[in-house]
Amino acid sequence: MRIIGGKFKGRKFFPPAKNWPTRPTTDYAKEGLFNILTNRIDFESVKVLDLFGGTGNHSYEFISRGCCDVTYVDKFPACVDFVKKTAEILAIQHCITIIRADVFQFIKSCSTQFDYIFAGPPYQLSTIPQIPDLIFEKKLLAPEGIFVLEHNPFQSFVHHPHFKEERNYGKTIFSFFG
């Protein structure tokens, strides 16, 4: 895993591989996504929510680009511990709030709005189609915000009422909502 842009560009991290419950976004897909976001987001002023945060890859990219208001959520203790340690190594603890919780429980209890929400759930998760509805029912996305859901080609959200566009990076699809 490497950070592809910003002040930490090129930094590599090596999460433990054995029994690791994550599927980090490929550098190719992440680069494509951040090329799009660079033209749509002022990284220094956004409030970010990283759901199913895993290795923290997405959170680090935002912080590396100047964002200092990131909330990371994941339920796996090893992932949370890894992100805490990485935040210490990068000295970015003041920019990231790390929450160990089930994402669906977090969404139900959250009352904060975010300018950018990213959800990168495990592709085999059967409840992926519920995520956009929950985000909008709970009004977690700010009025001009962007919500990006990462999923595989076997799912489509083009008929969702808040769907805006889809970007395809091989086996990784990003659906944008607003």
Image: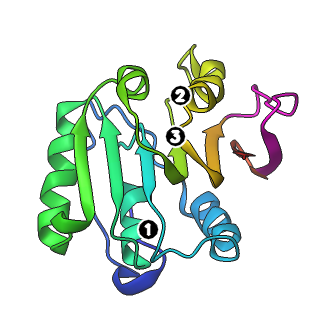
Image location (x, y in percent) of residue 73: 33, 39
Foreground residue among 12 and 120: 120
Q: Residue furthest bottom?
A: 7
| Classed neighbour count for the residue bearing mark 3: other residues with Cα under 10 Å, few (<14), some (14–19), many (≥20) | many
Q: Amino acid at mark 3?
A: Gly
| Classed neighbour count for the residue bearing mark 1: other residues with Cα under 10 Å, few (<14), some (14–19), many (≥20) | many
> Circle 2 sits in a helix, a strand or a loop, which is it?
loop
Identify the mark nearer the N-term, 3 or 2: 3
| Residue corresponding to mark 2 | 138
Q: Amino acid at mark 2?
A: Lys
Left or right, residue 170 beside residue 132: right
- Residue 20 quadrant: top left
| Residue corresponding to mark 3 | 120
- Distance of mark 3 from mark 1, alpha carbons? 15 Å
Q: Which residues are magenta?
A: 152-167
* Vertical order, 149 against 137 (above or below): below
Identify the mark nearer the N-term, 3 or 1: 1
| Residue corresponding to mark 1 | 62
Q: How is the image coloured?
A: rainbow
Residue 43 appearing in the image: yes
